Each structure stands twice: as structure tokens, then as C-alpha cells.
Image: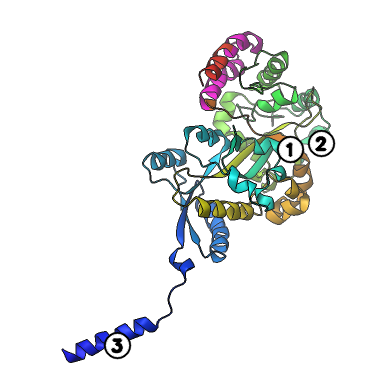
């Protein structure tokens, strides 16, 4: 008994002599981030997370990738009160801000002098997808402009000059026809690339600046939608719907069956083995004279119910800075240069200058409450019927406008 008592006393002395953990270590909190990253992408992101964690005493970031049914899983977790502190959202899901799901970081940004937290260092057409109403609900980490990939061998074979940013849409369509024969088509569409490219370049839009009107019957919009409808599945220039279903959409370009394909700047279409592929900005708009293009945009947002808003914000900023040196294209003006792009993705070196040329003209959606419902009506009652040949864009537009403005008025 005495021996046991002495051991206990000795242990107590040893414990008393051990160094007391610092308050920073005691207070270190866990910040959870959920993304759609697959195995390879998650491993690359983890390198950035590890760097951030190594620099911090107050928090550690834990990555919880959910690549399968991402938004369903995320919504379920948020609804159940067990959502992550940080989450990836594409621009289509940023309207969650109006559902009180996302934290407004405006005050944090106002007191942060780092470039990554400076709204003025983001392209306006990108920043608009996180600056919603009077708040800011995340930091964009990627803005992929849609660019034109083209198979140089097919152009050479058919004696057609390579695309340039000076091309008009009429010149583009003429080239698509000239590049089509029994072996390959000039171009391909199936609802992608986004019709907004044509609409914006023609000086139109699907919603007014004050979010009260849907001017889809404006002649500029009607002309752009009809231009798209006249090309899609038209075998004079593009594969039929049946051919695309049989051979695959992007796969046809990779197989040398399509001369031109519009894809995101980060796509691997310019490094397909056996193909000599160039990149150009999309043709310039008939009205704007600019190479207006759609950008696929994603941001990291903070859960409005996070228990650690300050730590979550710091993690957000540091992660975003790291991702801006990994993903292309960075959404920041100061990083819109060849050197930064190549440093982030060396495999894009050959076409880096052409990608950067497209960046100033990219933009995302104008977002608003009811955006998802609005887009459902736009495609269901206007785009899809026009593209399937059910009726002309001009005939469909008036009724579509009424339905769309009903959505706007109901919000």
C-alpha cells in the first residue's frame, strides 16, 4: 500500500513538472471543409491544407470530401445542423445566401488588407456571384472562361484559317460549315456551350439590372437564341443529337471527329495524345465587339451557423490564396497573366497567352432569389423548345417572358 502511495505521489510530481500546454494549443479548434473533390483532386488540395495547418496555432482544417451526390449530402448535413464550417459552391448554388445558409463576410473583408480579400482584385463578372444584395458570401477560387479549342490538323486539311479573337459569329459559322465533311464536323452543341455567350455578345441579357424584367423577347436575345438554334444538331456544321448520343459529346473532339469545341480553359482538350490543338477566345459579339464569354465559377463559403466564424474566415482566406496558385484560371486581376497561369498549371504553357486573352471578357450569372426556378423556366419554356425545333425563338419569347417575370415578381 505504501509503495502504491509513493508511486502516486511520484507521478503527481512528474505531471506537475511537465510543461503546461500553451493556451493556443489548448484553444485550437477544428474547421471542417466539405468539397466535391475526387481522390486525385482531394490529394492536391490536402497539400494546401497541410501548409495552412502548419502555419496556424488557433485552428486546424479537416477536409471531408463528398464527391458523390455532393449537393444532396451537403444540404442534408446543413439541414440537420451538422454541416461543415466551409463548403465549396458553384455559382448556381450561391443563392443559398438568401436562405440564411451562408455567412456574410463583409465586415471581415472591410478589416482585411490582404490582396486575396480585396474585392477590387476580382474581375467584376466573377465577384458578382458572391456579392449578393448587401452582403458578400464567399471568396471565388476559380473562374474558368469558356474558350474555343480547335484541331489544327483538320483546319490544315480543309484549308481553313485558324480561329482568332477577331472572328465574328458569322465567320465562325461559315468556318464550321467549311470544316464539315463525311469524316468530321466543324463544331458541336447540345445545350453546351452556354447560350448566354451569344446573348451577351449580342448586347442582350436574360434579366434586367433591377431584377424586375426578363427581356428575353428583346431582338438582341431572340437573334442570339435563334443563331444557336440554327446550328445545334444541324448536320451542315454539327453532329445530330443521335450521333452525339452514340459517340459522346466531348469524346467526338478527342477522337478527331469535331474540328472546334468550346470548353472551360482548364479542360484537358489541348493535351489529348495525338492531337495538335490550339486555343482561341470565342468570337467577338456582333453588338459589343467583345469576346464575351461565360465563366464557370466556384467559391468557398462559410456556414452561417459555424461555431467559429473568426477562425473559419481566416481559414477561408488562407485556403483561397493557396487555391489561387493551384486552380486555373485565378479570378483575380493581379494574377491574370501568363506567368501566374503557367506556374499554376505548367501543362497549359503552349496556350496560356490565348487563355489569358479571354479572361477580361468572362462573367458569371446575375444571381437573385428564385434563380433556380427562373433558370428552369428559361430552359423549359424557351431554350429547349427553340433548340429542338418546336418553334422559333421569336414565337416562344413573349410567353417565356411572362412566365419568367412571374418568377421574379414572386420573390
Disc 1 from disc 3: Cα separation: 77 Å
Dot 2 crowding, Cα within 10 Å, few <14, some 14–19, many 20+? some
Report whether 115 appears left or right of 14.
right
Q: Nearer the viewer, residue 21 or 52?
A: 21
Q: Nearer the viewer, residue 184 or 29?
A: 29
Disc 2 from disc 3: Cα separation: 83 Å
Q: How is the image coloured?
A: rainbow
Mark 1 or mark 3: which comes first in sequence? 3
Mark 2 or mark 1: which comes first in sequence? 1
Q: Which residue is mark 2?
A: 162
Magenta stretch, main secondary structure class = helix
> What span is colored magenta in the figure?
372-401
Q: Which residue is mark 1?
A: 150
Residue 396's tag is none
Q: Are the residues at dot 2 and dot 1 in contact (C-beta closer than 8 Å)?
A: yes
Q: Point out the frontmost of discs 1 and 3.
A: 3
Report helix, strand or loop for mark 1.
Answer: strand
Q: Which quarter of the rendered picture does the N terminus lie within?
A: bottom left
Residue 10's tag is 3
Amino acid at each position: 500500500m505504501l509503495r502504491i502511495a509513493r508511486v502516486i505521489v511520484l507521478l503527481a510530481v512528474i505531471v506537475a513538472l511537465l510543461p503546461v500546454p500553451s493556451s493556443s494549443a489548448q484553444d485550437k479548434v477544428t474547421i471542417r471543409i466539405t468539397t466535391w473533390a475526387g481522390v486525385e483532386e482531394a490529394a492536391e488540395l490536402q497539400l494546401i491544407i497541410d501548409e495552412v495547418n502548419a502555419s496556424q496555432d488557433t485552428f486546424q482544417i479537416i477536409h471531408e470530401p463528398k464527391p458523390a451526390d455532393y449537393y444532396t449530402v451537403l444540404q442534408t448535413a446543413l439541414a440537420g445542423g451538422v454541416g461543415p464550417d466551409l463548403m465549396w459552391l458553384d455559382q448556381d448554388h450561391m443563392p443559398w445566401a438568401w436562405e440564411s445558409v451562408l455567412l456574410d463576410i463583409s465586415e471581415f473583408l472591410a478589416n482585411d488588407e490582404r490582396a486575396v480579400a480585396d474585392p477590387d482584385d476580382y474581375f467584376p463578372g466573377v465577384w458578382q456571384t458572391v456579392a449578393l444584395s448587401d452582403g458578400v458570401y464567399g471568396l471565388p477560387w476559380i473562374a474558368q472562361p469558356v474558350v474555343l479549342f480547335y484541331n489544327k490538323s483538320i483546319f490544315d486539311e480543309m484549308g481553313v484559317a485558324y480561329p482568332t479573337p477577331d472572328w465574328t459569329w458569322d465567320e465562325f459559322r461559315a468556318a464550321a460549315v467549311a470544316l464539315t465533311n463525311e469524316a468530321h464536323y466543324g463544331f458541336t452543341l447540345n445545350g453546351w456551350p452556354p447560350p448566354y455567350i451569344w446573348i451577351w455578345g449580342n448586347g442582350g441579357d436574360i434579366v434586367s439590372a433591377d431584377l424586375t424584367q426578363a427581356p428575353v423577347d428583346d431582338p438582341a436575345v431572340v437573334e442570339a437564341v435563334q443563331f444557336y438554334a440554327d446550328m445545334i444538331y444541324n448536320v451542315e456544321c454539327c453532329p445530330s443529337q443521335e450521333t452525339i448520343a452514340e459517340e459522346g459529346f466531348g469524346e467526338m473532339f478527342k477522337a478527331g471527329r469535331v474540328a472546334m469545341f468550346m470548353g472551360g480553359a482548364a479542360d484537358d482538350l489541348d493535351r489529348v495524345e495525338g492531337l495538335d490543338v490550339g486555343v482561341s477566345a470565342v468570337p467577338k459579339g456582333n453588338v459589343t465587339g467583345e469576346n464575351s464569354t461565360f465563366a464557370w465559377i466556384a467559391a468557398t463559403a462559410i456556414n452561417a451557423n459555424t461555431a467559429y466564424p473568426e477562425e473559419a474566415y481566416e481559414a477561408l482566406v488562407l485556403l483561397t490564396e493557396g487555391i489561387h496558385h493551384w486552380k486555373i484560371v485565378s479570378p483575380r486581376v493581379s494574377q491574370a497573366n501568363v506567368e501566374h497561369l503557367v506556374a499554376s498549371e505548367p501543362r497549359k504553357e503552349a496556350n496560356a497567352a490565348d487563355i489569358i486573352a479571354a479572361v477580361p471578357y468572362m462573367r458569371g450569372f446575375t444571381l437573385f432569389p428564385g434563380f433556380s426556378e427562373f433558370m428552369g423556366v428559361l430552359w423549359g419554356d424557351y431554350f429547349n423548345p427553340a433548340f429542338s425545333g418546336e418553334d422559333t425563338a421569336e414565337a416562344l419569347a413573349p410567353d417565356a417572358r411572362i412566365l419568367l417575370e412571374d418568377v421574379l415578381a414572386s420573390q
